[in-house]
Image (cartoon, rainbow, N blue to C red):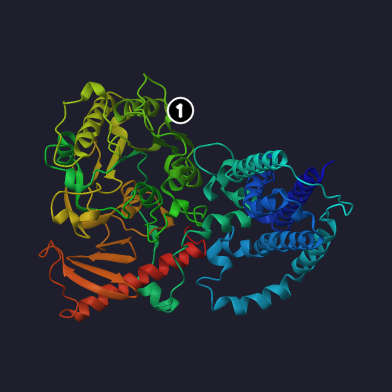
Amino acid sequence: MTNYKKSAFLFLQRFILIVLTYQFSRLLFYFINIELFDRFTLQNFVGGLLFDLAAISYINIPFLIAHLIPGNFKYNNLYQKILKITFYVVNLIFISTNFIDIIYYRFTGRRSTFGMITAKGMKQEIPGLLPSFLREFWYIGIIFLILSFLLWKLIPSLNDTIILKKITKKNYLKKSVFICFSIIIIVIIGRGGLQKKPIKIVDGIKYGNLNNAGLVLNTPFTILKTLTKKEDIEKVNYFSSEKLKSIYDPVISTKPKHSATKKNVVILILESFGNENINRGQTPFLDSLITKSYYFKNGFANGKISIDAVPSILSSIPSLMNNSFITSGYSLNKTNSLSEILKRQGYKTSFFHGAFNGSQNFDQYTTVAGFDEYYGKDQYIGKPAFDGKWGVFDEEFLQFFASKLSSFKQPFFSSLFSISSHNPYIIPEKYKGKFPKGTTVIQESIAYTDFALREFFKTAKKQNWYNNTLFVITADHTSSGGDTDIDKTNIGKFRIPILFFDPSNPKFVGINEKNFQQVDIMPSIIDYLNIKTKMVSFGKSYKSKENFVVYYLQGTYHCIKDDYYLAFANNQTIGLYNWKKDILLKNNLMNQETLRTKELENFLKAYIQTFNEKVIENKLSI
């Protein structure tokens, strides 16, 4: 065996040793916390191995290069000693995080992220917690020390009998090609395969139910995935626990006076259907449906991108982080989702999105949220309708949606997210020139989706489930750019239509002037259906006397309460406006109306403190 092959084989041996160490730490993680998990399955093992290989590959790319780089210098004894020690120390540091989570998982219910490892938001807690942890769980420290000793002893070394030979240009070329090929292979392993997107934290749900997702993942992987992302929420202590609860409490208990109404629920989430597109000729069908519905005139999105809308609408979790909740380290937190609540009432649940499976992480998040089934581009059955970019045109996919609903046993809860009014705004060739172009690039595709929605309701009206269904229609967010000054304010950027339509209830019609947001949809549906439950929700029912909206954008929190809007950044209020009278937000009232400013600021601080605590501590469910 040549020296170069010996070095390559040495790396492979060391790599396999680390893989086996990860398997040991997972088994230890499972057996010490066995009461927290369901039965360990082969699927869990396969998924765990995939995530282990991904983490180990990324961590060890530098060592692959150090082992395979052409040149005789790497056979030097000092080089080899430094390489072995560095390999050991780096890998042991990451392995130690798995051991930390053997205990810490009990308190968080999730694998730790970079933010936790660096003690972000926990500067006060760590000094007090660490000694008690070491005392109570001393045996974990002992096992780790034993493992550390064995790992060092088991790491193979390069054979000392190395005979150096002059390397020819041809050999340099061959070795250079080999190292490039090896790097490509290890990167593919690191990204979890050749699929369009690298595996993410939320993909852990693929290899086990939500309860076992933490078992499938490993802590080095979750750290690496959040390393370059600002974890961006930390515990704040504006108020004591008692004071906090008196200002804002997200726990909602419904106590209906009547028995539960077993109506089907259909939520239609329309891509980019912001207020700037409504009642201007682009959406004739939606405009007409609004007149037959219970319409929230002052509707707001809780985020600016599609991926923010789904947890807001389905789990009443707003987007108050720079990173989306779905892609954050908290994506596997347990929540009181609408699907989970309705399933307890006997509902069949499903989610539809016409884009390729994996788009926006919706398939994984809806699994986490407890949906029974997911239907994406891969599950579509019907005439060819691929838009050539990323999914099935809305008209055909909405018809597919209608046919699937007719096959479900009632009561059912289903949500669909449209795609055609998303960049690049493609509409079918046969409809070119049929719809008004509008004043912005998106509006022709908005008009097409409105037409597709009309065709869906034509089909739905003929089905036996139609009159027993509550339809909720909302946008995910506003368009990329409105064409009026109002659309461009920090209020206009979030204004969306939200309407509830019950064809069997002619009394449930009218215009609601109160401030209403996406996170209000879940508690409002529960209230409308007379379902008795207790849940964590950062919204409120449409029947509530509360009248607030909270959203976040680029480091600034925005709070609307009654007729006033407050902006809060860098831990201080930066503006107060009467948004009903001052629609362009020109007149800052914070120094004139100090009492009102303080009242809104306290409410917003309580909201932020509560949200951050519930997310960080994995307390988003009862």
Residue 619 visible in the displayed image: yes
Position of residue 463 measured from the top left corner of the image (x, y, whole percent)? 31, 25
Pointer 1 residue: 379
Give the left or right position of residue 331, taking residue 10 as reference.
Answer: left
Give the left or right position of residue 221, taking residue 388 as reference.
Answer: right
Position of residue 124 measured from the top left corner of the image (x, y, whole percent)? 54, 79
- Which is nearer the eye, 532 or 399? 399
Q: Secondary structure at mark 1?
A: helix
- Which is nearer the eye, 153 or 501? 153
Residue pushed farthest top?
Answer: 383
Q: Please, is residue 464 above or below residue 349 in the view?
A: above
**Image quadrant of residue 143?**
bottom right
Q: How many marks?
A: 1
Q: Please, is residue 465 above or below residue 570 in the view?
A: above
Q: Please, is residue 540 above or below residue 475 in the view?
A: below
Residue pushed farthest right?
Answer: 161
Residue 409 visible in the displayed image: no
Position of residue 612 measured from the top left corner of the image (x, y, whole percent)? 44, 66
**Image quadrant of residue 606?**
bottom left
- Amino acid on which disc 1 is placed: Gln
Q: Quadrant of the N terminus?
A: top right
**Image quadrant of residue 379?**
top left
Say few, some or many: other residues with alpha carbon within 10 Å of mark 1 (under 14 / 14 to 19 / 20 or more): some
Give the left or right position of residue 445, taking residue 120 as reference.
Answer: left
Position of residue 272 measured from the top left corner of the image (x, y, whole percent)? 27, 44
